[in-house]
Image (cartoon, rainbow, N blue to C red):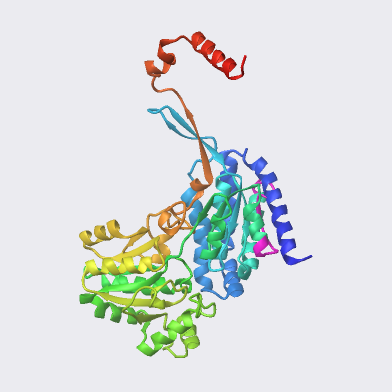
Amino acid sequence: MDTDLASIQEARDLVAAARAAWETWRRASQDEVDRVCAAMAEAGYQAAERLGRLAQEETGYGVALHKKLKNEFGSRWIWESIRDLKTVGVIRRDEARRVVEIAWPMGVVAALIPSTNPTSTTFFKALIAVKARNAIVFSPHPAARRCTYEAAQTMALAAENAGAPPGLIGCLQQVSLPGTQELMTHRQTAVILATGGAPMVRAAHSTGKPAYGVGPGNVPVYVDRSADLEKAARYIVASKAFDYSTICATEQAVIADAPIAARLADLMRAEGAYFCDPQQTDALRRTVFNPDGSLNGRVVGKSAEVVAEVAGFRVPAGTRILVTPLTKIGRDEPLSHEKMTTVLAWYTAEGWEQGCEMSIAVIEAGGLGHTQILYATDEKVILAFGLEKPVFRILVNTMGTLGAIGLTSGVLPSLTLGPGGLGGAITSDNISAQHLLNIKRLAYETLPPPPEAFAPGETMAGLSVDEIERLVRQVVNEILGK
């Protein structure tokens, strides 16, 4: 059979099976839901290392050990964050307003999975969907179909062994664009969870279905003169090097306050940062991006040594990231945009006000609504950044990669980060189980209706209803010539 036709048919079959399973699962008790989810989380956690290796081997992106950590986060850590969330029956009572809130599942979730974080995102989406009593069907990225399927099967088998109906968790194996389109637009698909590149997210939003999507993360990190520089240097280099920069909240540009810029650069060098000269920087401009402005797949998710080699120069052994000193931001400077690899832009600012302006420029170059990172101890500077930046995650003195997803900060743990209206999404939240619930509200009377609600309707010029009806009949008869 033609691959596209096979993919379309598989999508239809998986949605039908998911819908049938959901008809049973939507009646599950909270205890049943939590037992199944706990089993899924544990199965994912136990498979974290194996699937981390498989994801790295299949895609060629990132670091297997880092993917293991992300898998552990996407399973056990995510489960801990939603374990106590009520998703069945009455979930809240507001006695003062006399409103009872009742959870109601959405149905079948279509989940699009990226190649950069395939297994961890699959674990995460399976857990939040099943916790909210939904079914879910995954569409892998073609470059990550095997590891995504293995992750989905890990969740599905654990769920079924714990009492969930077969078919509740499905995954396409015949992957094609028409198959994914069929999955998203199927009449029994209720909502879409889209994590991946901009074209895929746009496609999800254009289906006419409710969709939660992410946006690009062109994340600036401003380092103020009041910052703990040793900590900032250590965190920035480690975060940028983490899984070779495949998380959307990875640092993309350092903006260093002028009085501390030289010291910060030295500290970053000690952590494994290599500062490129103008010729090397120009080589990276041509290497990281294709002539049409798209990212060069040869260097996405690759080590600094590999990226440098592709660009035509060598770096010392142990180099973790490549730093490119720049002066321009925007269309005329390719390296000021999101780089899904171990290349970090570098700017110097004269004070926090200019640092604020430069951060906004970086965000506007491709990361509206996503994330800003700030290293400072001056609360005035911290608050100013919080008030002014057109992003919805502003991380203070923590890593971008791990802070934005909620591993090293107090934001909601998630692997799908909404950029809000600024980034073309329906929400600015970190997406979790509560976003896959509908809420019914049982509302009792709190006040009697005002007297005006019971007043009779007004009549024309004081005429009674009978008199008005007689006049209307008379006019009609005259028109008809009777």
Q: Is 259 one of the magenta-colored residues?
A: no
Image quarter of the N terminus = bottom right
Q: Is 170 one of the magenta-colored residues?
A: yes
Q: Is residue 279 left or right of residue 385?
A: right
- Magenta region, residue range: 162-178
At x 42%, y 68%, the residue is 250
Horizontal and vertical percent position of residue 256? 27, 74
Decide whether the magenta segment is chiefly helix, strand or loop: loop
Q: Name the residue at the front extreme.
A: 481
Image quarter of the C terminus = top right
Instruction: Give the answer, above or below, for where 82 lies relative to 197.
Output: above
At x 57%, y 73%, the residue is 56
Name the one closer to the observer, 174 or 405.
174
Q: Is residue 32 left or right of residue 426?
A: right
Total marks in image:
0
**Hey, which quadrant is residue 144 in on the image?**
bottom right
Name the one closer to the observer, 61 or 191.
191
Q: Is residue 453 left or right of residue 187?
A: left
Horizontal and vertical percent position of residue 294? 50, 74
Horizontal and vertical percent position of residue 361? 33, 68
Please indicate, yes or no, whether residue 41 appears anywhere in the rendered image: no
Name the one closer to the observer, 313 or 363.
363
Instruction: Give the answer, above or below, for where 150 lies relative to 317.
Output: above
Please indicate, yes or no, whether residue 29 appears anywhere in the rendered image: yes
Horizontal and vertical percent position of residue 166? 70, 49
